[in-house]
Image (cartoon, grey):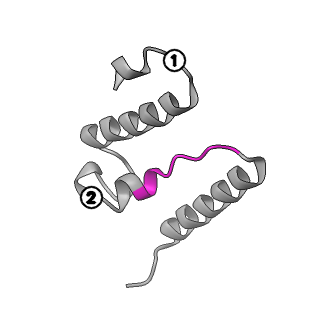
Amino acid sequence: MPIAFGEQAIFKADEIIRAVALSKGAALIDAKAALVERETSLFNDHVHLNEDGSEALALLVKKHLLTLVPCPLNELSQ
């Protein structure tokens, strides 16, 4: 099945975001690898997260942020 125009745009945007993060030395949370490729039941459609997907993404971001922000309470937050 050929890739739809909208999907091509998403793939291109993903490439650009990764390239900019790499060039700036910015942290990048790979939600695609963590969510999309793992579980399709987290989505209402091919792009939009459902409630479970939103919760999974929030937990992914939380875990990443806890690794960046030194805090003695981090052990209690996990």
* Residue under the point 56% across and 24% down: 69
Label drawn at residue 71: 1
Q: How many other residues sit within 10 Å of disc 1, few (<14), some (14-19) or many (≥20)?
A: few
Residue 30: in magenta span: yes
User: Magenta segment, which residues?
Assistant: 26-33
Predominant SS of the magenta segment: loop
User: Which quadrant does the N terminus fall into?
Assistant: bottom left
Across and down, in percent, residue 54 comes to: 34, 38
Of callouts 2 and 1, the N-terminal one: 2
* Residue under the point 55% across and 66% down: 11
- Residue with the most extreme top position: 73
Across and down, in percent, residue 41 comes to: 22, 54
Looking at the image, residue 58 lies above or below residue 21: above
Q: How many other residues sit within 10 Å of disc 2, few (<14), some (14-19) or many (≥20)?
A: few
Looking at the image, residue 71 lies above or below residue 24: above
Whether residues under marks 2 and 1 lie with C-beta atoms below 8 angstroms apart, the answer is no
Q: In the image shown, does 69 or 23 lie closer to the viewer?
A: 69
Which is closer to the viewer, label 2 or label 1?
1
Label drawn at residue 40: 2
Q: In the image shown, does 37 or 27 lie closer to the viewer?
A: 27
